[in-house]
Amino acid sequence: MSAILEPTAKPQIDIDRSVGDFRYDVDYSYDAGVGLNEATIDYICDVKKDPAWIREFRKDAYRKFLEKPMPTHWASHDLDNIVFENIRYYLSQGTQASRTWDDVPEEMKRTFERLGIPEQERKYLAGVEAQFDSEAAYSNIKAAVGEQGVIFVGSTEGLQKHPEIFRKWFGKVIPTGDNKFSALNSAVFSGGSFIYVPPGVKVKHPLQAYFRINAQNFGQFERTLIIADEGAEVMYMEGCTAPKFETATLHSAVVELVALKGAKIQYVTVQNWSANVFNLVTKRGLAHEEAEIKWIDCNIGSRLTMKYPSVVMKGRKARGEVISIALANDGQHQDTGAKMIHAADETTSNVVSKSISIGSGQATYRGLVDIPPHHRGCRNNTECDALLINTHSRTDTYPTIITRGNRNACQHEASVSKVSAEQIFYMQQRGLNQGQAMSLAVNGFVNDLVREFPMEYSVELKRLIDLEMEGSVG
Amino acid sequence: MSLSIQNLTANIGDLPILKGITLEVPKGEVHAIMGKNGSGKSTLAKIMAGHPDYTVTGGDVLMDGRSLFEIAGPDERARAGLFLAFQYPMEIPGVTIANFIRAAIQSRLAEGEELEATDYYANLYAKMDALKIPRAFTSRSVNEGFSGGEKKRCEILQMAMLEPKYAVLDETDSGLDIDALKIVSEGVNALRSPDRGFLVITHYQRLLDYIVPDRVHVMVDGRIAMSGDKNLALELEARGYDWVTETAAEPALA
Ligand SMILES: Nc1ncnc2c1ncn2[C@@H]1O[C@H](COP(=O)(O)OP(=O)(O)OP(=O)(O)O)[C@@H](O)[C@H]1O
Ligand SMILES: [Mg+2]
């Protein structure tokens, strides 16, 4: 035990000039050591001062994690390369979440700068929950949002200070044993956000969180729970870039959304992991009567991303939507998709997925649309488009549509296209170099979806695509 | 100062397509190239622009004294001042005309220099108005779903915006209705200047009534078989390509 409790040696200063590939010296005051066992979980509970029911919840989850097999019977065998014993499951600044921008340590501010968070967004920082490693390093709710009764805190604070709401929904949308990685997250989660929006409150500004990983072999296991009470509306934005390390890192988040009657939740992610990260995320929303849940998701980078945002439409006229962009560059595998579970009459869902595969990059779409026969008036529209940048690229589509019954409608369209040499030549003849031509073609391909992202993100997204394409031509 | 093609030969694979082309377009002049289908006109245009499918086996093309083949990529040649209006313009889904042309102009600016948006749009709209392209087109994807004539007009719009030193127009007149032919020709004529040379590839003498050429060249099987003034186009229309082949063969017989 004592070995685990020892503060770790300081990581080395190692600043790389390329964007998203840098590290600052951070003093990790708390460290759960390497590997996972019951003692690790006790350690996390002790440090975080978890209530007894959470300790029980974590341990139960840990057992489920051990029992569950790797899903390699359908998913990538690359999962077998995750060495669970080599991962650090908990790191913390050990500090209270900061209240004002002035309280934020200087080196973290520098990090945000390097992440390219635009100046104008600093205005919104009052409403930002930015996660630095596994503890919220900065947290301040914009006064107006607070006045409206909105709770926007870290998950730890949420479960400690708002147990009456937290406990009611936590782990209910995504049961612990949903899959091996949701079980892992449930065992060791730290960080992430807890948001509650009271009935009828429409949150004007998007709530934002920035995540990153900043220690070698350090996996991040955020846990986010968002509840929009009846008629409430909220948009949440999450953006990630990660420094580059020599060994693989594991990121395994769980995000649960609950939209009560007539509520609307939009969850926006723009993510740019470095090429050694396993990003295995479980995201699911529960939409009650006439509620609307929309996942807007962009996955760039990582070694393997597995992410299938889902909406369970359990109330009449509920609506689910997934808009996703995946870009798989050389050596990367984006295994993404969507699940739409129609569990009530007149529920409608829409899935639009666009993937780009470059070089040896691989993009896989897995979709599930389930409309049981006893429901009526349900509709789904699914559209999957793949763009291949060169002949090595792979794209696979596994759409599963289960419509048992004839009082419902499903529509499915899929396309695969290439950026042709003639298109590139045409653009080059106008003066664009090969990289610019490629990135223009790719940006064109995703353009209609990029418009769905909030303004700041769409700009950032375009820049990310440019960066990816620059590196992809000789 | 000229665009000078000197005994240019080129293959596709092992197949010779251009078999020794020599012609010179001095700055300020308009030259026309006519010739049968498959004689190599588009090949010539694409080789100058740097299309990767062709192998240059001999000769040279000098743009104001500088060999095009020493300028590496098609994009560098374009930025050096060469423009090609394509016979078959490509579609670029999702990329609007406004953004495309903007990116093209931006590529010509120095590092860190930004195109001023209001000036750019003012310029774009003025040129669109002149070419009678509805302004709504700025938000349409490049060439996607355009009619044949709209594509050609859009090529000329790009040329007008990019202000090249030398422009090669490959059958820009084909697919244009009578009114559009006039509008496009006026667009080209407006760009005629002592600082600019044009090489206009066409099948129809009619275009040359509007864009009056300084010289007309007739291409037969990868060679320039005959050159003359603007009247050559009329004569060609009256007598056909067989006349060119026979006439061109005569000196060899003599
Ligand atoms: N990529 C290619 N592969 C094989 N043959 C080619 C290729 N490109 C051109 N050619 C051949 O080269 C010859 C010249 O073609 P080119 O397109 O230059 O003709 P053109 O004079 O422009 O004809 P048109 O008046 O019909 O436009 C043709 O016989 C054509 O089939
Ligand atoms: Mg041609």
Image (tube, coloured by chain):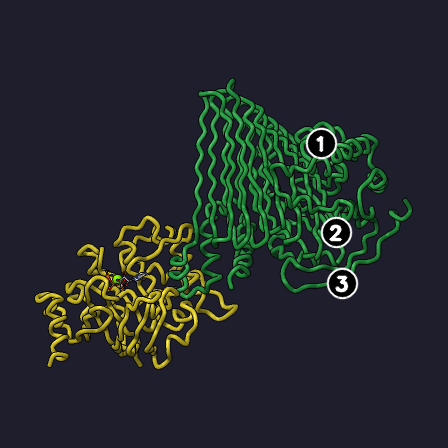
Chain colours: A green, B yellow
Residue matched to label 3: A13
Mark 1 residue type = Thr
Disc 2 to disc 1, how far (Cα)?
24 Å
Return the disc, 3 or 2, that comes first in the chain's sequence.
3
Residue matched to label 1: A176
Disc 3 to disc 2, how far (Cα)?
16 Å
Q: Is residue B43 above or below residue A310?
A: below
Q: Residue at x 78, y 31 (%)?
A: A60
Give the tally of numbered discs. 3
A219 on left or right of B143: right
Task: Establish whether labels 1 and 3 are both on one chain.
Answer: yes
Residue A217, labelled with which disc? 2
Q: Is residue A248 above or below residue B77?
A: above
Q: Is residue B192 above or below residue A257?
A: below
Check contact, mark 2 vs mark 1: CB within 8 A. no
Estimate how packed mark 2 is, as few (under 14), some (14 to 19) or many (20 or more) residues with alpha carbons within 10 Å. Answer: some
Disc 1 to disc 3, how far (Cα)?
38 Å
Task: Establish whether labels 3 and 2 are both on one chain.
Answer: yes
Task: Establish whether labels 2 and 1 are both on one chain.
Answer: yes
Furthest toward the top, the residue is A374
- The chain identifier of the residue carrying mark 2 reads A
In the rendered image, residue B167, in percent from the top left (x then y), is placed at: 30, 69
Under circle 3, the secondary element is: loop
Estimate how packed mark 3 is, as few (under 14), some (14 to 19) or many (20 or more) residues with alpha carbons within 10 Å. Answer: few
- The chain identifier of the residue carrying mark 3 reads A
Mark 2 residue type = Asn
Mark 3 residue type = Ile
Return the disc, 1 or 3, that comes first in the chain's sequence.
3
Q: Residue at x 37, y 68 (%)?
A: B50
